[in-house]
Image (cartoon, rainbow, N blue to C red):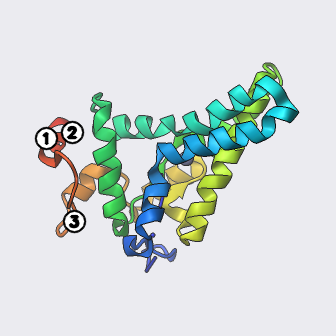
Amino acid sequence: MQVGDPELVSGHRCFDLNFFTRKEKKQLSSLKVHTVQSITTSAALYPFIGENVVPFGLAVIFIDLDHLIEYVRDTRCLDVLGVFSYYDIIIKNIDRNYLALSVFHTIEFFVLVFCLSTLFPVLTYVFFGMLWHMALDLFYIIKARKPFIRAYSLIEYFVRSKSGKYVTSVLQILKMDGINTSGISNLSGWMKKWGA
Ligand SMILES: [Zn+2]
């Protein structure tokens, strides 16, 4: 999941949702897209790596499970169906300087998987699946000129989130004036569940 342009408080450019076309917005957050990418790249790689396309392909898709971790961490809500409305709010209000932490997309996690792959060789294919997923994510956010919506390292997230220049919770966004909540399904129900 990712994202938008104007002026960030910190000197980075801020995120303007209008920068994205409808299609791009869909692509940035779509599990379907990563599934299709996984299947097509796995099919292309099958002649070369055989059954190892399975850990590779699964990693391309399931690295995004960290979005659920972020959702639960932020909302303290275990009803994971709210994750769709949650990210919808972020995407629709991306001009509010939201800073995302996707743990499986951080350098530290990549290093961990890489180190573990020396003990469990199958993780080598998981590692390359994660790298491929990351390359695809980066393609979209760089194309949209919004590379700083997400922290790429836990340390980076810690430093930036403490700077006071970023919004790190959807609950903070929901308290802001003039936010865009159009088309977000069951918003009041989710707000209740999230204690917003
Ligand atoms: Zn991703």
- State the quadrant of the C terminus: top left
Residue 115 position by quadrant:
top right
Tag 3 residue: 179
Left/right of residue 161 with respect to residue 37 in the rendered view: left
Q: Looking at the picture, how far across and down is residue 58, in whole percent?
A: 62, 31
Vertical arrangement, residue 141 with respect to residue 51, above or below: below
Check mark 1 vs ligand 1: CB closer than 8 Å? yes or no: no
- For marks 3 and 2, give the CA distance: 17 Å
- For marks 2 and 1, give the CA distance: 9 Å
Circle nearer the N terminus (3, 1): 3
Circle nearer the N terminus (3, 2): 3
The three-letter code of the residue at mark 2 reads: Trp
The answer to whether one can see residue 77 in this image is yes
Q: Looking at the picture, how far across and down is residue 178, in whole percent?
A: 18, 70
Vertical arrangement, residue 186 with respect to residue 18, above or below: above
SS assignment at label 2: helix
Tag 2 residue: 194
**Residue 189 circle label:** 1
Q: Nearer the viewer, residue 150 or 160?
A: 150
Circle nearer the N terminus (2, 1): 1
SS assignment at label 3: loop
| Residue found at x 52% / y 68% | 146
Q: Nearer the viewer, residue 23 or 78?
A: 23
